[in-house]
């Protein structure tokens, strides 16, 4: 069973603790505030573990000066049982949606190359089929496009070009803007928009404009 990552980055103005402390803030800020936080968060996590919502997690607390507190709870695997550790490597999976794709889209909006209300069909006329013409960027970001969560894997077996044809042929599963439905398809389309506007592949754009400038070197 895969471990779930539960990480809190909170600007709490809290301080030292018996688990681990970082930086000069640890000696300056009242320890009882962090102790109160730890008591509350420990209760939440132990409840979640007891209800089998996750086998374990790592909690981190930080402010503008960096990480102040970090503690591992529960197990990182159940078969075999293996305790959670601070250096456990987690499968981040769909974290690439907000970190890579959504950040790229917001950068393009900030640069004036894209708007939240821009329709996808403005960039890809073929996407408008089957009543999808009103879908705009904001619908994709908020998962209110009405598109299916995932189209069949078979749609991707003949390569990216045919996969895009299959996406453009999709029908709506709900009226646009009326329901939240988490969809990988939404972010595939957003990635396609990044490539269309920048002339770069999504991985190249994110590497040059997000990961390298931020010093994000681990994959």
Image (cartoon, helix red, strand yellow):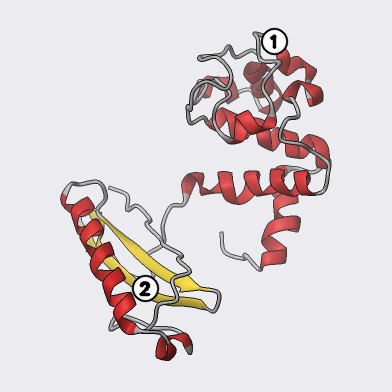
The residue identified by callout 2 is 70
Disc 2 to disc 1, C-alpha distance: 50 Å
Quadrant of the image occupied by residue 69: bottom left
Name the spot of residue 149 as percent of width and height, x first: 49, 25
> Quick check: 102 above or below 33?
above
> Quick check: 44 above or below 163?
below
Mark 2 and mark 1 lie on one chain; the one further toward the N terminus is 2
**Residue at 41 percent of width and 70 percent of height:** 61
Name the spot of residue 119 as percent of width and height, x first: 74, 25
Quadrant into which the C terminus falls: bottom right
Name the spot of residue 55 as percent of width and height, x first: 24, 53
219 or 69: which is nearer to us?
69
The residue identified by callout 1 is 129
Judge left or right: residue 164 versus residue 23: right
Q: Residue furthest left?
A: 50
**Residue at 62 percent of width and 65 percent of height:** 216
Name the spot of residue 54 as percent of width and height, x first: 26, 50
Q: Residues within 10 Å of mark 2 (few under 14, many from 20)?
A: some
> Quick check: 52 above or below 67?
above
Which type of secondary structure does the marked residue at label 2 adopt?
strand
73 or 23: which is nearer to us?
23
Q: Residues within 10 Å of mark 1 (few under 14, many from 20)?
A: few
**Residue at 72 percent of width and 14 percent of height:** 128
């Amino acid at each position: 069973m895969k471990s779930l990552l539960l990480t809190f980055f909170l600007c709490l103005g809290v301080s030292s603790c018996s688990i681990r402390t970082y930086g000069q803030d640890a000696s300056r800020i009242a320890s009882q505030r962090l102790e109160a936080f730890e008591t509350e968060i420990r209760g939440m996590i132990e409840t979640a573990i007891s209800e089998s919502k996750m086998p374990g997690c790592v909690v981190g607390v930080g402010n503008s000066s960096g990480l102040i507190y970090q503690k591992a709870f529960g197990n990182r695997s159940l078969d075999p049982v293996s305790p959670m550790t601070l250096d456990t490597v987690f499968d981040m999976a769909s974290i690439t949606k907000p970190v890579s794709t959504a950040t790229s889209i917001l950068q393009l909006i900030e640069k004036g190359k894209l708007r939240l209300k821009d329709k996808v069909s403005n960039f890809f006329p073929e996407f408008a089929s089957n009543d999808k013409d009103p879908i705009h960027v904001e619908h994709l970001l908020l998962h209110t496009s009405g598109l299916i969560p995932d189209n069949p894997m078979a749609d991707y077996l003949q390569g990216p070009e045919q996969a895009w044809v299959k996406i453009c042929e999709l029908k709506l599963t709900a009226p646009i803007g009326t329901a939240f439905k988490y969809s990988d398809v939404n972010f595939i389309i957003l990635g396609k928009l990044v490539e269309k506007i920048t002339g770069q592949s999504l991985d190249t754009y994110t590497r040059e404009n997000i990961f390298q400038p931020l010093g994000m070197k681990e994959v």
